[in-house]
Every structure is written in C-alpha cells, then in structure tokens.
Image: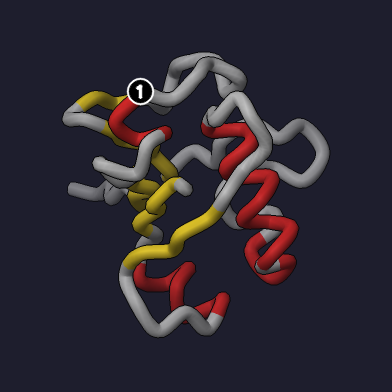
Amino acid sequence: MIRVVLPSPLRSLAGLPSTELVIQPAAPASVASVLDEIESRYPMLRGTIRDHGTHKRRAFIRYFACSRDLSHDPPDAPLPDSVASGAEPLLIVGATAGG
C-alpha cells in the first residue's frame, strides 16, 4: 500500500476528507502506476496532475519522496522502498510561482 499526499485543491476536487490517500498501484510501484491508480479511482483528477494525452507532469506539479524531488525522474522509475512499503508518503505538491 502506498500513501499519497495530494494538494488541498485536488483533495477538494476529488471529495477526499483526509490529507492522505492510501492506494495499491500495479507493481512495480512508480509515479506512473500511482497516478494511473489515482486517476482510475478519482476520474475527476484526470488531466490535473499530468496531461491527458502525453501523461507528462503538469508544469506546476512536483513529486517528492524521502526528501527527494522525483519530478524529473522517469515516471516508470521504481519508487524508493520506504514509499513502496508505506513507511513514507509520496507527496504530490502544487508549486507556486510569482514575484
């Protein structure tokens, strides 16, 4: 089981009451398999985290795990063992910009 923390606007859109979502993605656990499972369970989130057609990460979305930015890693790269085991969460973060 993988724990996922979503940004507040996405939690609201999906109607999730808590900050963490627990899912069981297809093995091996990767950012892509986690997002596939999230979009399958919560279709209203399709296109909000990654593009519908290309499945590329949206510009202002970041993925973090174990104090590492996984945003530029290949989406099929295995998640760290502590995330795959549920000990640590995968954080999906909405980045901010401005001046």
Between residue 27 and residue 35, name the one nearer to us: 27
* Three-letter residue code for mark 1: Pro
Between residue 18 and residue 44, name the one nearer to us: 18
The answer to whether residue 28 is above or below residue 5 is: above
Query: Which residue corresponds to the image point at 26% horizontal and 42% vertical from the top-left?
Result: 87
Q: Residue furthest right?
A: 53
Between residue 87 and residue 91, name the one nearer to us: 87
Figure quadrant of residue 58: top right
The answer to whether residue 38 is above or below residue 35 is: below
Query: Which residue corresponds to the image point at 42% horizontal and 44% vertical from the top-left?
Result: 60
On the image, the x and y values in percent for residue 62 come to 38, 38
On the image, the x and y values in percent for residue 32 come to 62, 33
Residue corresponding to mark 1: 80
Q: Is residue 12 rendered to the left or right of residue 38?
A: left
Query: Which residue corresponds to the image point at 43% horizontal and 44% vertical from the top-left?
Result: 61
Tell me which colouring the rendered structure shows: secondary structure
